[in-house]
Image: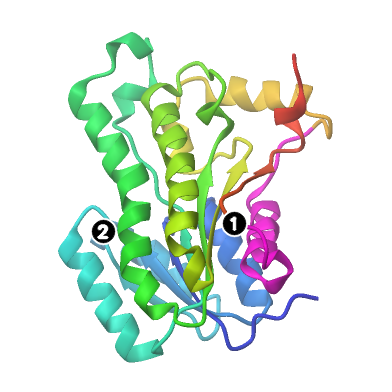
Amino acid sequence: MIDLTGKTAVIFGLANKRSIAWGIAQKLHQAGATLVLCYQNERMRLEAEGLIAELPGAAGFQCDLSNDNEIEALFATLKDKYAKLDIVVHAVAYAPAHELHGDFLDTSREGFRIAMDVSVYTLIAVAHAAAPLMSAGGSILTLSFFAAEKVVPHYNVMALAKSALESAVRYLSYSLGARGIRVNAISAGPIKTLAARGVGDLSEMMHTHAERAPLKRNVDQIEVGGAALYLSSDLASAVTGEVHYVDCGYNVMGY
């Protein structure tokens, strides 16, 4: 049994019950971690607060990671309230919906900029803000997808963002390793999250994954949460800079 009692975890990207962030939050909470759950804006506040109320002792804060001022204000508040952090989960990604349909060749400059800023730079920004509070070391996690290395039709510019995100994980692991801070990514199989619903032919993608994966099914949020729990714990004390697959084995298949 993994025990995270006395550890404080900050999770970014809570939107609704379908969020991978929610699956991770449930597993970390079950292990005894003190949770801080962050949602993007006022529009998402009501549903997020309803979920946070289901986890006794958890606190909620609004923070749009595309805004440096909001990041700075949040971490100042966290420093005052918690003094130190142990676990940071970055479950944030976005590209304009029209970029996730049609031909990759039609990717716009603005769509590319937004995808890279929200899906990749925000991890760097969060790591930079969190590192001074992770005085005893700890774990930073983010979420990737198999499209980072193989072509997934319609994933388009988001695939490039995931490739860059995985590279950022490796560079951050090097930058933060001397402080005892580990940085890893979980590459989950397709899940019907709020963000994933914007991807063209998501249902076909999920059907194909379930058909071809060795386990003959798709993954769910709680299973991703289990992997996050392991990577957040001392059981993974020598694991950093890695991409850990939680996709029912789909990535090992050649066809």
On residue 42, the disc is none
Q: For the view shown, which residue lies furthest in the front direction?
A: 178
Residue sitting at x 69%, y 21% = 208
Label 1: which residue? Answer: 240
Please name whichever residue, 208 or 118, is drawn nearer the observer in this view of the structure: 118
Image coordinates of residue 171 in percent, x first then y, are 44, 49
Region in magenta: 217-239
- Is residue 196 a member of the stretch shown in magenta? no
Indicate the amino acid at tag 1: Thr
Please name whichever residue, 207 or 170, is drawn nearer the observer in this view of the structure: 170
Distance from the alpha carbon under mark 2 to that under mark 1: 27 Å
Give the position of the N terminus as an image quadrant.
Answer: bottom right
Q: Nearer the viewer, mark 2 or mark 1?
A: 1
54 displayed left or right of 36: right
Image coordinates of residue 43 in percent, x first then y, are 27, 57
Please name whichever residue, 73 or 175, is drawn nearer the observer in this view of the structure: 175
Q: Secondary structure at mark 1?
A: loop
Image coordinates of residue 202 in percent, x first then y, are 54, 26
- Is residue 226 a member of the stretch shown in magenta? yes
Give the image quarter of residue 211: top right
Indicate the amino acid at tag 2: Asp
| Residue 192 shows in the view | yes
